[in-house]
């Protein structure tokens, strides 16, 4: 969907200006025009664009200004479609039992904000190999992070109580491996 909005907002490529009189007339008529912006489009196109957005994108567009707040629908059907699509792709879903589908404010309070942040940073694109970019719909994510940034993110991660037990259980395994390899001696 982002590519559709991008195509609507970017001006068309001008034809070559060699000795073509039609191209010269088109270029002369386009010089007085400014680039088309989203608000310059007719309301029918606004409505069509908003109907093709998934819930997080529709919610973001809805909070741009009062016009879009009244135009964009973020109703129950859109929320359910978004949750079903996330389940179909085996992505993390809000699992709060207090999700209120009736209002955007109470819809899975902290979970949606976190999932939208992960989506903006293309973290979900890395969740499974071969998934591709979920934002642009391509087979490879152009924002794929390098190994160094993954290590930095892992080092910033807070270790929960259970992770400390896993790390503690790995210490004897590593020591036994080192003893068997002859690296560590008693």
Image: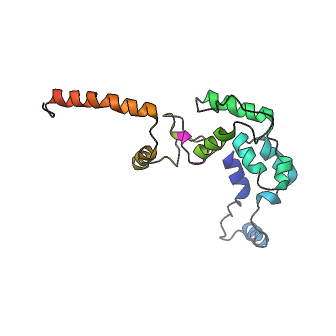
Residue 77 can be seen, yes or no = yes
Residue at x 73% of width, y 37% of height = 107
In the image, taking residue 47 as reference, residue 80 lies left or right, namely left
Q: In this view, does 120 lie above or below 185?
A: below
Quarter of the figure with the N terminus: top right
Residue 80 location (% of width, % of height) = 74, 31
Task: Residue 91: give x, y in percent of width and height.
Answer: 58, 32
Asked if one can make out residue 139 in the rendered structure from this viewpoint, the answer is no
Residue at 73 percent of width and 54 percent of height: 8
Say which quadrant the C terminus sits in.
top left
In magenta stretch: residue 181: no
From the viewer's perspective, is 128 left or right of 178?
A: right
124 magenta-colored: yes
Q: Is residue 67 above or below residue 184?
A: below
Q: Is residue 165 left or right of residue 38?
A: left
Q: Which residue is drawn at 76% across and 62% down?
A: 36
> Which residue lies at the image location 79% right of the left edge and 33% below the top edge?
76
- The image's colour scheme reads rainbow
Nearer the observer, 89 or 63: 63
Residue found at the very far front of the displayed protein? 161
Q: Nearer the viewer, residue 70 or 167?
A: 167
The count of marks equals 0
Residue 34 occupies quadrant = bottom right
Q: Where is residue 121 in the image (x, y as percent from the top left)?
A: 56, 48
Q: What stretch is highlighted in magenta?
A: 120-125
Q: Is residue 130 left or right of residue 5?
A: left
Which is nearer the eye, 23 or 127?
127
Which of the pair 121/155 is nearer the observer? 155
Residue 82: x percent and y percent? 70, 34
């Amino acid at each position: 969907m982002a590519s559709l909005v991008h195509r609507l907002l970017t001006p068309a490529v001008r034809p070559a200006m060699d000795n073509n009189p039609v191209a010269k007339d088109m270029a002369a008529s386009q010089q007085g025009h400014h680039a088309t912006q989203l608000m310059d489009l007719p309301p029918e196109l606004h409505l069509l664009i908003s109907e093709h957005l998934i819930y997080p994108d529709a919610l973001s567009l809805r909070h741009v200004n009062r016009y879009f707040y009244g135009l964009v629908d973020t109703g129950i059907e859109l929320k359910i479609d978004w949750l079903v699509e996330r389940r179909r792709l085996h992505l993390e879903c809000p699992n709060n039992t207090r999700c209120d589908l009736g209002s955007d404010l109470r819809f899975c309070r902290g979970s949606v904000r976190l999932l939208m942040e992960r989506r903006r940073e293309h973290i979900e694109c890395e969740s499974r190999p071969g998934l591709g970019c979920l934002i642009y719909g391509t087979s490879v994510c152009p924002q794929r992070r390098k190994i160094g940034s993954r290590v930095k993110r892992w080092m910033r991660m807070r270790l929960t109580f259970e992770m400390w037990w896993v790390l503690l259980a790995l210490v004897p395994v590593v020591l036994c491996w080192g003893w068997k390899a002859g690296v560590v001696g008693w």
